[in-house]
Image: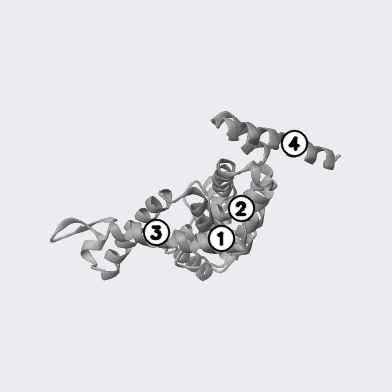
């Protein structure tokens, strides 16, 4: 029964992909997303075992990867859509997790306790008719008070402060944190962000096949052999396109320096 359903889904996906290739539309694309949503769920379940991120957030990010795959799938290559789409879904999730990766690593059991604390606080507020003290929260969690203090401090300091955050200085008045605490590395960060934008613009100007090769190799961490298999070309061609693409990017980036 499951095999029959699977074949039916593949057949329907193939027909919709053919329609989308001939006449791209939001309606057909959305149908394809719904039909292949299982690919996203499977990948998200894998990453949920390795990170504390919200399930729904990862689903949304994974769907962006699925949409990107739908827009770039080429029926003439003869590849299975699922095999083509998974690297896009996985790559989108990986980049999201890298961008959100905190500078302070918190033990998984502490993150679990921190989430449980919200329910404990809510329950105690009803029972006590006031906000519970740290000692009462720790008791509700069944942990020592000093451990709860450490958990609170770790979670509070998990994300770094933005250097653009407004602060009030008694002498200078309103200012940003970056102005009060000069950091030579902040300018480097700004330049890196500008370079990233320029790189995205340069990528968009590359010939389509070359851009796809660079994205698979450098953005989605595939080997040149895997990239060749995905795109239906030889590993030698992949190598040549990587060199050609990098040379073109250097030229385009160089003209904007």
Q: CA distance from mark 3 to mark 1?
A: 16 Å
- What label does residue 11 carry, if any? 4
- On the picture, is 3 further left or further right than 20? right
Q: Earlier in the sequence, mark 2 or mark 3?
A: 2
Position of 127 relative to 46 (above/below) = above
As measured in the structure, the alpha-carbon distance from the residue carrying label 2 to the one carrying label 1 is 9 Å
59 is higher (above) or lower (below) than 133: above
Comes first in the chain, label 3 or label 1: 1
Query: Which element is circle 4 on?
Result: helix
Give the class, few, some or many, for how many residues have Cα within 10 Å of label 2's Cα (few <14, many ≥20). some
| Residue at 51% over, 59% down | 241
Q: Which of these two is toward me, 184 or 210?
A: 210
Secondary structure type for disc 3: helix
In this figure, which residue is indicated by the disc labeled 2?
231
Check disc 1 and report the residue beneath it. Answer: 238
199 to the left or right of 82: left
Which residue was labeled with disc 3? 249
In front: 123, or 97? 97
Q: Quadrant of residue 195?
A: bottom left
Name the colouring of the figure.
one colour
């Amino acid at each position: 029964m499951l095999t029959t359903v699977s074949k039916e889904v593949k057949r329907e996906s193939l027909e919709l992909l053919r329609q989308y290739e001939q006449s791209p539309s939001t309606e057909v694309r959305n149908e394809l997303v719904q039909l292949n949503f299982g690919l996203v769920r499977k990948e998200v379940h894998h990453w949920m075992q390795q990170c504390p991120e919200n399930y729904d957030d990862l689903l949304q990010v994974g769907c962006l990867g699925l949409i990107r795959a739908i827009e770039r799938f080429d029926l003439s290559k003869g590849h299975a859509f699922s095999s083509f789409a998974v690297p896009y879904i996985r790559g989108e999730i990986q980049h999201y997790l890298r961008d959100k990766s905190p500078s302070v690593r918190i033990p998984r059991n502490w993150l679990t306790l921190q989430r449980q604390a919200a329910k404990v606080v809510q329950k105690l507020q009803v029972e006590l008719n006031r906000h519970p003290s740290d000692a009462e929260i720790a008791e509700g969690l069944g942990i020592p008070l000093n451990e709860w203090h450490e958990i609170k401090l770790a979670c509070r300091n998990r994300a770094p402060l933005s250097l653009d955050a407004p602060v009030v200085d008694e002498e200078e008045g309103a200012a940003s944190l970056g102005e009060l605490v000069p950091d030579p590395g902040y300018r480097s960060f700004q330049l890196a962000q500008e370079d990233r934008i320029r790189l995205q613009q340069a990528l968009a100007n590359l010939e389509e096949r070359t851009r796809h090769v660079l994205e698979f190799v450098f953005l989605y961490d595939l080997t040149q052999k895997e990239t060749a298999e995905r795109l239906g070309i030889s590993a030698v061609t992949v190598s040549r396109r990587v060199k050609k693409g990098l040379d073109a990017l250097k030229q385009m980036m160089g003209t904007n320096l």
